Amino acid sequence: MTQNEWVLLLMIASSLVPGLMIFSLSEERVRLRTTLNVGGAVLKTGLVIWMLLGVYRQQTFELRLQLLPGLELALQADALSLLFVALSTALWLVTTIYAIGYLEGSPNRSRFFGFFSLCVTATVGVAMAGNLITFVLFYELLTLATYPLVVHRGTEAARRAGQTYLTYTIAGGALLLLGTVWLYTLTGTLEFIPRGFVASLGDEHHSALIMIFVLLIAGLGVKAALVPLHGWLPQAMVAPAPVSALLHAVAVVKAGAFGIVRVVYDVFGVEFAAELGVMQPLAWLASFTIIYGSLRALLQDDLKRRLAFSTVSQVSYIALGVAIAGPIATIGGVVHLVHQGLMKITLFFCAGNLAETLGIHKVSEMNGAGRRMPWTMAAFTIGAFGMIGLPPVAGFVSKWYLGLGALEAHQDWVLFVLVGSTLLNAAYFLPILHVAWFREAPESWPEERDYGRKETAWALLLPPLVTAAMALAAGLLAFAPFSPLEWAKVISPREFYQP
Amino acid sequence: MPAGSAVTGVSWGALLVLLPLTGAMVCFLWTRAARILGLSTVIAVCLAVAGLGWQLLQEGVYHHAAGGWGAPLGIELYADGLSLLMLIATAAVALAVSIYSTGYFKRARAIRFWPLWLILLAALNALFLSADIFNLYVTLELVGLAAAALTALGGGAAALRGAMRYLLASLLGSLSYLLGVALLYHSFGSVDIAMLAARMESSPTVWAALGLMSAGLIMKTALYPLHFWLPPAHSSAPAPVSAVLSGLVVKASFYLLLRLWLELFGSVSEGIDNMLGLLGSVAVLWGSVQALRQTRLKLLVAYSTVAQLGYLFLAFPLAASAMTAWNAAAYLVISHALAKAAMFLAAGNLMHFAGHDRIADLDRMVQRLPLTVFAFALAGVSIMGLPPSGGFIGKWLLLEAALTQGRWDLVAVVILGGLLAAGYVFKVLGSAFTQAAVPQRARRVPASMEWPALLLACAAIVLGLVTLPVFSLVTIGDAFGVDEVVP
């Protein structure tokens, strides 16, 4: 095996092996467990940097294993996969630290961290999948690995949420599988290549291809929470905060969104998909989801549920950017994969801090929270501004490129969606900021825990500050080399026909 | 003398039958050492399977005329890639079940279990090695009798009722098969499969024989609507016996049906294949829905077997124009053997631990018996057909064949069956995460009972990643009638 093949294998192993080892540890081995967790995360981060530099220098990373005659499992690292891999790996490291602080003293931590590591393994696999079958494999693995995290608390509510989660995701997985096999019987290959591999099929297959597209997008849309397939997401909020943060900012919803990006660009090819006439309906669906999610978020008093509906709305920017089918909108959609992750994880961390430190679960309980926990609320504010799309936070960059891209592709109606969604975002985030910073604090908090002079434990405070800083940096330094935006600009031209 | 001939010179096939038979007798006579003797016999059988595998890889198809008398007069043993695959799956399940049984059966029951179990193993091996339809009848009857006796081993009214029903269904099945054999012998004057195949033609007698033999075997394989005996028998038997019944015994009659179909009846039976496919589809859906409705764990797993057996019959209508379908069936047979055995062993552990198998009261088992629940979940992955697992490969190949031929009805069955399977597997897992309303008993489960279940389940998963060796094995002797298997 070559060096680069080892790197890919290690990428998988660096969370899989610690995860399996953690399962076998007893509850009390806190130090060893932490070492394994953080060690794996740091190793993975190093590998990602190695691969970033490698891909930057035009090296290829590929690892293959024969699955069936004529069908291989393939791991690869191209610019698009690295974008997602880098995001998951960085946020895994941060979330691990957060989870260690959050779950301190609670039962079944070995199980929690074991499955947590498996989730990251699956996410990295999804990101590095070199063909559709490998993608399906890790996509299903992700479903299985997240289920124990959703039901982690073992309550009746958790069990029901887990059931809903599975009903949606397993059904979605079945559609995805069906679409994949069908595609395979037509093309005989499933390898991801820029501008896709189905365009060469004759006209007589076009109706079948449209059906396959619908199946694949429906299967992926479940995890990407496209309306009407989003029902599991708000319910899954019973999970502990680090799970909500990682699942809803990175792992699960992004696996779906990333899958849509892959299918549109590297299976169908965006221009061929537009020719088939499937891009316009996808754009409408994404726009509807954006507005619908925001409207629902507006009505939620439970903070985590409000954030969940906000996720429903925000993730669809990615699908929208893809569906506009122009090079600039592509940049906006792809870069939002990273930007939304950074901002939303910050918000969920902060919500977790409020719940853990003050017992606040509802927006109506947040009066004066900013004075009691200024650092947490500062991070929350950055995240919220980013969601609204205020410069210089990262969210602005995404919306800017989406808007430009829509104009370039002569789809001016998208601007109304963007403006409407921005207003709605402001309508559900600004009141939170207002009550938290400008209202008087109540006499006592619902369930306050004492952390001495600090506002909360450092392991809880540091992660949101780091991710907020990253969200800010991604906006401020958008034109610096290796920024998400610059990376997205490398990806976009590969997917369009260059005359 | 070349180095390899020490291995290839031995008649491993004969050993595969003689070893467990002798073991059974010794266990019966020397009851005090039954456990250790039984286990060592099974280990020896595993080694013999390895030897036979080596021999097949070196020299191709295996023939052995017992006592020097070949067909048509004597008993001839025959093994190609398909037989070997079944023998390997049998050996793997047998080893795990035997290790499990050393912890499961205490003295009094152990001395009854081991001789019966070894006889069953001998009969299964003999069945997979037989090449004439009368010997196949004898082995089939032996398998049925030994299995029914083992079912009754649990004691109690439910077990006896289950065993009795099983025995009657099984006898009826073999009787029907025997009538078919008699008809064929009367028409063609031979019971050797190869000779019959050469003389086969379409005639009313052949049709009657085909109907009788198939009906008998279908009953023994518990295809809907002839499955009625399976759930009570498989759920009331002791855990290791359930594992063998669901994992291996029903596969034996399916294997036989497949063999007859491939070599004798395939050419003279238009229309039947669609009939089998239809019954299989109903079995998949009906069995899964029944499994989903159960409140007892072992019944749930037993109905899941009814559903999973249905999948095997989906291959018949597809195989006419895609040999991939046979590969799919072979893959589903062995991965279901491993996964379902693992599931029954895991269910046995949960029952041993808590003293009951009510699904709703699986009080936080995921903390209390993590290895067992993990084994159940992994086996569930294969049963649901999620990647990577043997079950996934089987379903992928089935779907591919069905889609290529535009059989959307079968596509829908495969997909729906997978969804329903996820429903019943996660019904169990969901309850294993939550706290039950009533306090539970807790009895220690020895490691010798937890690990076999987990290892079998892992094997079902690994099967999803080693398809090429399995396919190249199946091509030895070309059982599916293609020169090269090209899925």
Image (tube, coloured by chain):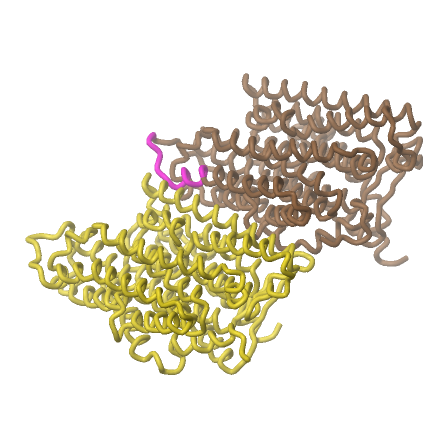
Q: Position of residue B368 (x, y in %)?
A: 41, 41
Q: Position of residue B263 (x, y in %)?
A: 83, 38
Q: How many marks?
A: 0
The part of the image, by quadrant, that contains residue A434 is bottom left
Colour used to depict chain B in the structure image: brown
> Which residue is drawn at the image coordinates 56% and 71% (left, top)?
A6
Q: Position of residue B299 (x, y in %)?
A: 52, 29
Whether residue A67 appears in this view of the structure is: no
Q: Is residue B429 magenta?
A: yes
Task: Say whether residue B170 is left or right of residue B132.
Answer: left
Q: Quadrant of the C terminus of chain A?
A: bottom right
Among the chains, which one is yellow? A
Question: A143 or B231: nearer the eye?
Answer: A143
The part of the image, by quadrant, that contains residue B142 is top right
Q: Which residues are magenta?
A: B427-438
Q: Is residue B166 above or below residue A276?
A: above
